[in-house]
């Protein structure tokens, strides 16, 4: 349900075993301060929440755990990655999430909360936090799939057409991969520290689940690295392909020039206006000249053939 | 023997000192749950088995050890690598293996089991697990050999023909090496942790054998790195070769153009229709002109020779 | 206020709870020695302050902490980075800063000092040091923004015009990024050691603030790495674009040459002065020849079209 | 002396203070088993000895130390590296070496053994082992020298002739360096662990000698890395050189074409058979035309000169 | 003063508080042995001194510390780096230095020794050792400055002239940087271990000075890395510049060919000797033809202009 008054939170906090408050969009500093007061949140944390563009990290304030994640969307048409900062405050019996914009990937979690008898209703706030983080990380896989599709499409395009436009797309994709990697890389350390260190609000029973998330993040990072290597390979193949095409074009040009320049020279010789040119008066002169040209032509072709030019 | 009923397992478990159950193909979640109940397998483990595409890893659940490996096949015709996830549950006196598809590289292990007096019959479940993992890792070497053959074949092809097609194959091979590396790299950590850490189900007597497997994995990874370096070198050599060819072609073109353009110009001069062109009326005019052309031709050739163009 | 006599410092030191002395510009070794004597500063430290161009570092002398930072300015017109060494001496109840030139980014800090009731007036010298360092690091972000703008501008320029000049700018930018990275990289270690190690003059209450600065530095370094990757990508795209253009040019040349060389050859044949050339006397000879040329032209164009040359 | 019967070993083992048995060539599994029985060698070790192509490593079996090294030969004519596995079993008072083929670099060691009063006769088996390993590592330096000579020779060849053949050699050399690196790199770890860890059969007095070997290996690895960097630099210089040559060739072609195409066009104009072409009848027409051509030629040359084309 | 007899050393050793013996040039093994006996130097150390080309390292022999450094000279004309091994034996109250050749950078140290009242006369042998090492490391900075000048000079040359010779120099510089890096890199570890470990002959009071040297070495290594990155960038810029020039040249060629080939074809058409060619007899035929050529020329130029070819 949607809350409009911060003071309701205090009531809710007492009332429920586990409380999840989700705050979307533009944060009003005043409201933030009130929330901070209600839940005892440090001023530094509130500042980090307000200044989006943080690096993924986890900070332990004993009373609560503060986590930053990047929610990522891939706009396949523009080949563009859109990031949104997700801040989590994980307390003993509450989880507060701060999103930049409405709309998220938490609907499956909400459904499981509403359904009776799921683990989410039995476990405490730490398991809820796990579920939310897991939903974010699972979403990365669907983005990786989108990127893989884009790569496969570009791969075909580049090899078939060597179009500058496809190359432009490849370059844009490379750039997005660089940014994606930067956003996800620190998550490894973040979730890793949850599985290793002893945080008060994370129970031992939930740690195996976080280890699972950790495995997923490693897999995501590995896959991004593989994508980067593949994109680099495509780049190099494209360049080699362009060079090959240039070779082809140059060969055609050279064959044409090499064949017709000597022949044209011969026609030039017999086109000169000297009074005395041997053969001009001869009846078969023209035919013999054409025949010689044919022989030259054949010799050239044979030469190119032995050099495997075509 | 092939088992169709899960409950038979309970009987078998009691009956034999070491039990190996191999489950192929599509996993029925219902059967999985039953197996899980019989052998006391964690729900997270069952999920990991069902969701193939896991990263190689080892997880200790005290009662049993859960391991994931990638079985790899190299289709030499398509130059494609096919992966299959192998999940191992290593208990005190049983080993359960889960494969995605029927057909594997465990026949030698099966033969040694059937043969009397082999170590496999004397030792416990940990040695059986070692034998299975060793079989998978040994198979990697045969794949490396296939890749080496492909590399050698491409190396000859590229140097001889500079064909775009051979380059395409090289690129495909590079891509497969990237994926292969990603699949095998984590094994190093996985097997390494078995030799280092103290897992309940792995006896001290079997650890030297796992150390042996570890050495093999390092060797596989080293070899993949070497292959990558070699393939990169081939790529660069190919590009240099293309450039060299282009140079050759350009040289031919330039020599032809440089020789025949001035000569054709001379024929053009004496082909003009001016009434007064000195020499046209002279009896030896034509022969002198041809002689001058010969001198120009010779000079050009000498010039190219001194510049080492051919 | 501006102090001209060093001995005033002794008075001031006793008088105030926290003292900040800022020394700009050319350091007089004599004055430096006096300051050193008043505040008990080690000779090695004084030497490091005088010799600018130090690597960022922190040195603990129990009585005080000596820190070196680089203040960075980005001249967007010249695309040039200007560095200035900032030395900090952090004592129990004083902070001394040494700048190479007057003019800095500390005005916000000064304002907060003057304002009553801010944390800066409540806390001790360590919090003042944090405020100064934070101001320097915050300034890095504005430089990163300037660089990002430059990158975006060059990206458009390079793709649109492939001008050698834009490439020159890209190269200069790359060079500046190398130097920037060298200046900021060691800061990571420097601030990291403040958050980890136990320095006498840094109170436990201020450490979270330094952890915040540490996070910012990591973010700066990450961003520089991303910029480097992007600039490298732009470089490669530029090269690929040049190659593509060359291809385009070669194609035009080859098409023209391939079409007109055979046609010119035909005109040459019928321009020869043999007495007997079949067709010359024929009334329709010229028209048939032109028609044949048209057919050759059409055939060439069709050939190029099937090879997708245009 | 050459032993043909394994049982002699038992006698020898009792008789001498330090025993060195060297086994060349094809290993007979039967004999191996006998040796294993006599000296108490583990089955895994015997297998490793039989399967050559092992990674350099050291394994401690308390009773003895098992070491694997690669002996390397560089065939300078073919530019090929030949590897041979050397297995060492270092016991309390014996050293057994297994070589793949007869012929080795141990003759200096043998001479020192025969000479009276050398350290080799005073010290125990561990010093003998050191001497053998030192001989292998010292041999690496002579190989590095051979490679350096090859690099220097190729460097001159490449810069002088840009021959494709010299480049082929460079590529082969690169490949050999990759393999060489792979063989020597693990040695660092191997010898390092001898100097660090406490192996029963290696006395404290001999450890400084192994530290010396360790220094040598680091030097070898450093040098290989430097060679790789240099070879990469040569590769890039070669490519730049090819591109430069191409530029040269293109310049010649362009100058020739740019000069003679307009001139030939002019001759074509006055070669047309129009009845009325102004100037044809004029007495000085030809000379003026030639003069105009000369002016065009001069203008072109001046233009190329200002653009620094030659 | 110059000593010719080794036995004098013994006298000197007793006589002075701190003794510095500097041995230049070819080492006589006999003399070396005598020195070894007098100062109790290990045989392995003496061997290392004799075999120059050692990697920088420090070895603790309790009685004394053995250090190896590389003294480096940069011959700016040849762009060549010359290395010389400096071996230091640091004892309780003596320092022995071994240089390959006479002539060094220790004159400032000598002057400070001779001057009364400097620290060098007050402190012990460890401070003398520091002074010598500091002189060597300080000299590195002047070499870095020389290299920076060379880089700046080449940068201008390459951008202005794209001469193959400047590129050759760049390549040579790259090679020298590789070697320089190899020589200085291990120093980091060497001096680092002096500041960290507890060596008997290095007093606690001198350690801060060594920490200072350590900072300098890190700065040198950082700078070499930056130089390498810059040189790589210059290399790439050079290649891009060559490609750009090629484009320019190709454009000129293509424009000329594309303009004059069709025009020459037209002159060829009207140069044919058919009896019936329409227009030849017409009074304005020539002028109309020339006009058509002008239109074609204009069209071509317009086309090239719209494609931004000039």
Image (cartoon, coloured by chain):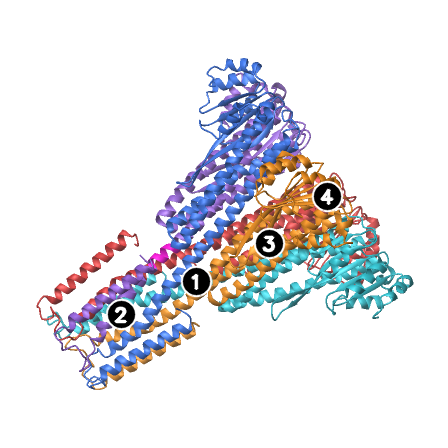
Chain colours: A red, B purple, C cyan, D blue, E orange
> Left or right: where does residue B290 sit relative to residue B202?
left
What chain does mark 3 sit on? E
Q: Is residue D263 magenta?
A: no
Q: Which residue is mark 3?
A: E225
Residue under numbered circle 2: B262
**In this view of the protein, which residue sits in the foreground, D129 or B164?**
D129
Using the rendered image, report if marks 3 and 2 lie on a common chain. Answer: no
How far is disc 4 from disc 3 in space, using C-alphas?
25 Å
User: Between marks 4 and 1, how big is the CA–CA gap?
Assistant: 57 Å
Q: Relative to residue C205, is residue B50 drawn left or right? A: left
Distance from disc 1 to disc 2, alpha carbons, whole Å, reads 32 Å
Q: Closest to the observer: E248 or C295?
A: E248
Of circles 4 and 1, the one toward us is 4
Percent from the top left, x then y, of residue E63? 71, 36
| Protein chain holding label 1 | C
Residue E87 on image: x %, y %: 63, 44
Q: Position of residue B210 (x, y in %)?
A: 59, 29
The secondary structure making up most of the magenta span is helix
State the SS at label 4: helix
**Crowd band around label 4 with a 10 angstrom C-alpha radius: few (<14), some (14–19), many (20+):** few
Nearer the observer: mark 2 or 4; the answer is 4
Name the front one of labels 4 and 3.
4
Q: Which mark is residue C244?
A: 1
* Chain name for mark 4: E
Q: Are marks 2 and 4 in contact (CB under 8 Å)?
A: no
User: Is D186 located above or below residue A106 in the figure?
Assistant: above
């Amino acid at each position: 349900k949607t809350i409009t008054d911060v003071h309701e939170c205090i009531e809710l906090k007492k009332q429920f075993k586990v409380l999840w408050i989700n705050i979307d969009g533009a944060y009003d500093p005043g409201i933030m301060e009130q929330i901070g007061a209600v839940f005892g949140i440090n001023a530094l944390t509130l500042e980090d929440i307000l200044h989006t563009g943080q690096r993924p990290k986890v900070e332990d304030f004993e009373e609560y755990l503060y986590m930053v994640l990047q929610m990522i969307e891939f706009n396949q048409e523009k080949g563009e990655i859109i990031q949104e900062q997700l801040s989590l405050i994980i307390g003993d019996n509450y989880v507060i999430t701060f999103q930049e914009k409405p709309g998220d990937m938490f609907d499956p979690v909400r459904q499981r909360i509403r359904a009776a008898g799921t683990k989410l209703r039995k476990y405490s706030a730490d398991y809820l936090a796990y579920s939310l983080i897991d939903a974010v990380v699972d979403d990365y896989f669907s983005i990786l799939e989108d990127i893989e599709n884009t790569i496969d499409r570009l791969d075909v395009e580049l090899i078939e057409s060597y179009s500058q436009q496809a190359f432009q797309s490849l370059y844009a994709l490379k750039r997005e991969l660089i940014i994606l990697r930067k956003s996800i890389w620190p998550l490894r350390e973040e979730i890793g520290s949850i599985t290793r260190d002893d945080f008060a609000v994370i129970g031992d029973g939930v740690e195996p689940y976080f280890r699972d998330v950790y495995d997923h993040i490693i897999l995501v990072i590995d896959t991004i690295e593989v994508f980067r290597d593949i994109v680099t390979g495509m780049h190099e193949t494209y360049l080699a392909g362009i060079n090959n095409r240039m070779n082809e074009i140059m060969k055609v040009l050279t064959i044409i020039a090499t064949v017709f320049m000597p022949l044209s020279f011969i026609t030039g010789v017999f086109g000169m206006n000297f009074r005395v040119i041997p053969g001009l008066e001869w009846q078969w002169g023209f035919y013999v000249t054409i025949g010689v040209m044919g022989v030259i032509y054949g010799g050239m072709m044979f030469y190119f053939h032995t050099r495997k030019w075509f």
